[in-house]
Amino acid sequence: MYRAAIATAALVLLLLYLTPSTTPFSPYNTGPDGLSKAVEMCRVEDDADVFIIAPGASVPGLNVTASTSKIVDPLINAGDPYIPLARAGRYAVIAPNATPLRGPGRVVVSTSPTSFADTSRGPYALGLAVAVGNRTIYIYHASLFTNRAIDRNLKFIQEVCRRPVKVVVAGGDLSHTFHVAARAIGEWLAPMLITAISLYLLKTWRTWPRRRES
């Protein structure tokens, strides 16, 4: 009985590890709204000078949050009002399903004046530079880094990723939560555990008919 329970639990963990997240803006989401391609290009660290935050998420201690109200731009867009164009220094970037960043700081990425969210009018910040002591913390909206946007925003993303980044997502499905926990216990430890689970399942399945026959 207990072996069957262990095998079931191991199989669930294996499936969670192998199944991509469907959470929008998750680094473990391989779909159009995920950040899987961007995080492969970036050096992800907990102690980072660059934060990439998803709608509903915030940066602890800096009073910066990403709203949950989607930005619509009927004029300055990439063929869809929900894919507004934004200016990021010398780059023109797209921001699919973006929401405004709220908080202090110097605006480094912004939408056009024709954009709006709910009843308010743009332009909206999608990137902020916040001075903290002798450091400058950069905060960007996750929409700029999605798999849908990566080809158009490639040079911008490459420039941002010269520094270590941290992705902040509010909530998430089981797959996202599992991968976050796996990363917390170590990039090298998680694959070892998954390998051990796989070997255990293989051994269990091979011996299962014999146990039933006996």
Image (cartoon, helix red, strand yellow):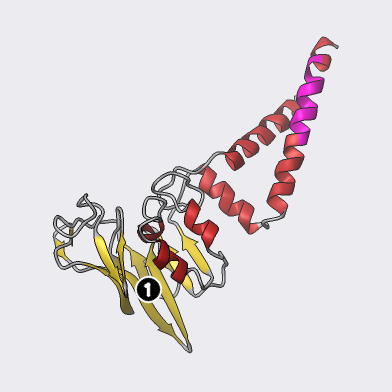
Does residue 122 sit above or below 148 in this rendering? below
Residue placed under numbered mark 1 in the picture:
63
Taking the spot 57% from the left edge, 68% from the top edge, the residue there is 46
Taking the spot 80% from the left edge, 28% from the top edge, the residue there is 203
Residue 210 placed where, x, y %?
A: 83, 15
As rendered, which of 104 and 129 lies closer to the eye? 129
Give the secondary structure at mark 1: loop
- Which image quarter: residue 87? bottom left
- Which image quarter: residue 103? bottom left
- Which image quarter: residue 122? bottom left
**Over which residues does the magenta segment extend?**
199-209
Taking the spot 48% from the left edge, 44% from the top edge, the residue there is 173
Q: Residue furthest bottom?
A: 134
Q: Is residue 151 left or right of residue 44?
A: left
Task: Tell me how many marks there are.
Answer: 1
As rendered, which of 141 and 172 lies closer to the eye? 141
Residue 176 lies within the magenta run: no
Task: Answer whether residue 131 is visible to the viewer in this image.
Answer: yes
Magenta: main secondary structure: helix
Q: Residues within 10 Å of mark 1 (few under 14, many from 20)?
A: few
Does residue 13 sit above or below 87 in this rendering? above
Q: Is residue 212 left or right of residue 177?
A: right
Tell me the quadrant of the picture where the C terminus can be found.
Answer: top right
Residue 41 placed where, x, y %?
A: 52, 60
Q: Residue furthest top?
A: 213
